[in-house]
Image: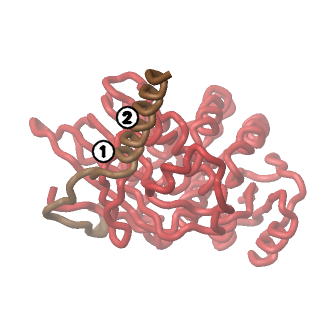
Chain colours: A brown, B red
Amino acid sequence: MALLRRALAAVAIAGIIAAVLRLRGSGGTPPQSGGWRELSGPGLR
Amino acid sequence: MRFLVCGAGAVGARAARHLVADAETTAVLVDDPDRRRRAAVTSSLGDKAEAVEEPDPAAADVVVLASPPPRHLAVAKRAVAAGRHVVSVADSVGAVEDLLDLHAEARERGVTVAVGAGFGPGLSCVLARHAAGQFDSVDEIHVAHHGTGGPACARQHHAALRGVGFDWRDHTWRRRPPGSGRELCFFPDPVGGSDCYRAALPDALLLVPAFPGVSRVTARLAATRRDRLTAGLPMLRRPHAEGRIGGLRVEVRGRRGLSRDTVVLGAVDRPAVAAGTAAAVTARWVASGRMLATGAAGLAALVEPLPFLQELARAGVRAAVFEGL
């Protein structure tokens, strides 16, 4: 019974950690230079 | 030219409005299961518009499908069988696959089925083709979407976040779990940066056939933490009548001479407005014989990108380039 409780606790903790990692964290770094410019001119460049 | 617009929602109503404003349009037939909405849209469009109880593709030169994607295939099949062109704004993997399957019959009958002719996919495909024009060969295309149009689009966004995504990698299809592959994508202002994830998006299905030799094509969808947490549940509240401003980001990598380079194009607009405009421009091009091919395909394979983007810009949908990579 104790083993089962420990296994369930481990699964629950792993689930919580996975949920936190899934919902938090960083997706990358913002560009450090450059910017958007509307396409213009006859060639829309 | 006579057009049948199926679906008088956020996208269909905009498409119909563009079409009635064209001097060469003689009639726009509006079909929608919601009788009150159909009547309201038709009466706001003026004399050229006419409400219809049942969509009859044979009554028009071009059929514009702006209803929820599951309804597209049945009408598209009837339209192709009747020798009529089809423009669909379908944005779900299933609907796009079904419509692409009409390719052989459409080719045989000499008609065009423009698949995914909205904002994303649609304008995204045209931007990819436009960027590809700056390369000798294209190696990779990466598309990101932000925002939703009307309620059907919001439902599709919700469903996409729990559906398996398809990436094209090393010349083969790979299934990707939804919500994986987080990437911080920067869209033109005012959208800015947003975390984007793999989802059930049809972009790669439309882009891969249009770019023979491309080795990687991916598509991601911007989502909030709440979107991802609740993706597996039914929508907890009714979707909004129309979303706020959305964006597209299309990154194309390729070879130019001996060097490799990257071009990033984007667009921001209200997705339903941009989708309606893109669908109307596509419908006019189809009707006037300006498409590059017959059969079922995405816009990257069907339109000349420069004049198409110029026409969209005249209608208020403008693209942008990211400089300083």
**Crowd tier of the residue under label 1, counting other residues whose Cα lies within 10 Å: few below 14, some 14–19, many 20 or above:** many
- Disc nearer the start of the sequence (2/1): 1
Quickly name the residue at label 1. Answer: B132
Left or right, residue B308 beside residue B32: left
Please give the chain letter of the residue carrying mark 1.
B
**Residue at left 59%, top 33%?**
B97
**Amino acid on which disc 1 is placed:** Ala
Q: Quadrant of residue B21?
A: bottom right
Q: Position of residue B56 (x, y in %)?
A: 84, 49
Q: Is residue B25 above or below residue B65?
A: below
Residue B149 horizontal/vertical position (percent)? 58, 62
SS for tag 2?
Answer: loop
**Which residue does the image show at 82% across and 46% down from the upper left?**
B58
Question: In this rendering, would B56 be left or right of B244?
Answer: right
**Residue B167 image position (x, y, % from top left):** 40, 32
If the image is split into quadrants, where does the C terminus of chain B sit? bottom left
Give the residue furthest to the front: A2
Image vertical order of residue B201 relative to residue A4, above or below: below
Is the residue under label 1 in contact with that under label 2 (CB below 8 Å)?
A: yes
Please name the residue that numbered disc 2 is placed on.
B211
